[in-house]
Image (cartoon, grey):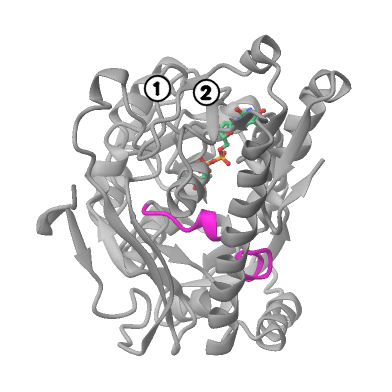
């Protein structure tokens, strides 16, 4: 069933610079929302699907969704939690250490996390002795976080909410936003809201998957309804243009297939060194790679089409040999790949996932049942397709026994491979 007008709307201009010079990049078809897992009783009901396509702004170089789904549909009750991966939790611990050193946090310092989810990142700061506060719209996760001892305000981060938080709490020494900025429609309000909440010598640390890695590694399945924006550094510099905040440093890391961590400060804050050399070298790399060039995006779309064809041929070959295949990681990205490739429960017998909230549910669109991870030792499938490729090292490490007993892993990106 297609969506109604009020649930989804088509953008008319770039969300950062307002330009109408948007070119189409790729269309992944009408899909259910990527975390819209189903209960058994709902499988027979008509499922809502929404157009999933991205455009590229030729002015500021932001890649962005063409159609925006009402955030309440996606985030009111949210099943993704970062604590389902040891790799992500370790990454959070390192991030907390980095921030602590950068702004010398103490027991009076307030650290705020925008999109705090179950409070996993803030618990790392709590362990460092700072004051913490979460902000998240998901009713179910706000309850979990508060039970975890992470005070959390329910709501979507914007200038209005930030003023309410400032009145009730105090200004923050550090504001974090990992894997959430890409989910927010009004990016200028994020900057204004953060600025209103920051002490004069505070820092604001954003982290999200990096556009250059997405294009270079064919990571099309990280394009989904929750991710409105896919940032180049050039697009972020545009976002900074008229604000009281400025980017003072950038770091790249391997999380989620390649992410960038962007450090912001108030322009009046002279305590943090402006790392112009790094910023310039990343902008030069983007230019050299062709990240501002239309051809890059048409070539990307062609590579994804070929990846789809090659993968379906390989999977069909295995099924013709009567092999059974299961999926590992009922991730948002898994649902994008499965629905775009038109895979269903006749190809993938079942999924396994470490997230308790997802076990016992079914994948949206394809209706593949989700079990706990130990199921693969009960049914001993010939192949395990790792949909959560960003954690393939952790998953393979954890399942050495499956390989020893003759099982094989499949990875699809950047191209189809058996391990
Ligand atoms: O931006 C977002 C990213 C950070 O997380 C959110 N909008 C949505 C979500 O995307 P995702 O679902 O693709 O995230 P993950 O963290 O890549 O999903 C990994 C999935 O794999 C989780 O459902 C947990 C599962 N998993 C598992 O079953 N066993 C993960 C590991 C490491 C494991 O050992």
Residue 71 shows in this picture? yes
Q: Is residue 220 magenta?
A: yes
> In the displayed structure, does residue 74 sit left or right of residue 133?
left
Compared with residue 151, is residue 63 higher up or lower down, i.e. above or below? below
Tell me which label, 1 or 2, sits earlier in the chain: 2
Q: Residue furthest right?
A: 404
Bounds of the magenta segment: 212-225
- Which percent across, then down, holds residue 341? 49, 53
Compared with residue 155, is residue 3 higher up or lower down, i.e. above or below? below
- Which percent across, then down, holds residue 67? 28, 65
Residue 176 shows in this picture? no
**Most foreground residue, 342 or 105:** 342
Give the residue drawn at x 68%, y 40%.
318
Give the residue drawn at x 64%, y 39%.
320
Mark 2 nearby-residue class (10 Å; few <14, some 14–19, many ≥20): many
Give the residue drawn at x 66%, y 81%.
286
- Which percent across, then down, holds residue 18? 31, 83
> In the displayed structure, does residue 292 sit left or right of residue 79?
right
Query: What label does residue 361 carry, if any?
Result: 1
Does label 2 point to a residue whose CB lies under 8 Å from ligand 1? yes
Residue topped by disc 2: 355
- Which percent across, then down, holds residue 69? 26, 55
Quadrant, the C terminus: top right
């Amino acid at each position: 069933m297609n969506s109604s007008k009020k649930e989804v709307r088509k953008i008319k201009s770039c969300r950062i610079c307002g330009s109408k010079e948007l070119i189409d990049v790729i269309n992944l078809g009408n899909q259910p929302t990527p975390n819209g897992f189903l209960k058994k009783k709902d499988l027979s009901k008509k499922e809502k699907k929404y157009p999933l396509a991205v455009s590229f702004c030729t002015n500021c170089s932001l890649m962005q969704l063409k159609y925006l789904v009402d955030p309440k549909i996606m985030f009111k009750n949210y099943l993704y939690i970062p604590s389902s991966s040891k790799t992500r939790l370790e990454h959070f611990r390192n991030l907390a250490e980095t921030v602590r050193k950068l702004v010398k946090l103490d027991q009076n310092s307030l650290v705020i996390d925008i999109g705090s989810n179950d409070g996993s990142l803030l618990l790392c700061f709590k362990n460092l002795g700072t004051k913490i506060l979460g902000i998240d719209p998901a009713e179910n996760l706000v309850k979990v976080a508060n039970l975890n001892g992470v005070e959390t305000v329910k709501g979507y981060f914007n200038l209005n909410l930030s003023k309410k938080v400032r009145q009730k709490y105090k200004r923050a020494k550090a504001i974090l936003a990992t894997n959430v900025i890409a989910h927010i429609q009004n990016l200028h309000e994020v900057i204004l809201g953060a600025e209103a909440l920051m002490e004069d010598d505070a820092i604001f640390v954003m982290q999200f998957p990096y556009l250059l890695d997405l294009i270079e590694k064919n990571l099309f399945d990280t394009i989904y309804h929750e991710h409105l924006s896919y940032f180049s550094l050039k697009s972020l510099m545009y976002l900074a243009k008229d604000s009281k905040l400025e980017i003072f440093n950038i770091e790249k890391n391997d999380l989620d297939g390649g992410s960038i961590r962007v450090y912001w400060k108030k322009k009046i804050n002279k305590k943090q060194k402006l790392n112009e050399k790094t910023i310039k070298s990343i902008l030069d790399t983007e230019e050299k790679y062709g990240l501002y060039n239309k051809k890059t995006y048409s070539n990307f779309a062609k590579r994804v089409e070929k990846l789809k064809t090659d993968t379906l041929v390989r999977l069909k070959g295995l099924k013709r040999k009567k092999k059974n295949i299961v999926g590992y990681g009922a991730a948002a990205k898994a649902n994008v790949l499965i629905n775009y490739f038109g895979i269903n429960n006749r190809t993938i017998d079942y999924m396994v996932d470490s997230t308790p909230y997802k076990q016992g549910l079914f994948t949206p669109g394809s209706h593949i049942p989700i079990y706990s991870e130990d199921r693969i030792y009960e049914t001993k499938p010939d192949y395990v397709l790792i949909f959560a490729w960003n954690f393939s090292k952790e998953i393979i490490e954890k399942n050495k026994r499956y390989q020893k007993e003759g099982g094989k892993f499949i990875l699809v990106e950047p191209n189809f491979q058996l391990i």
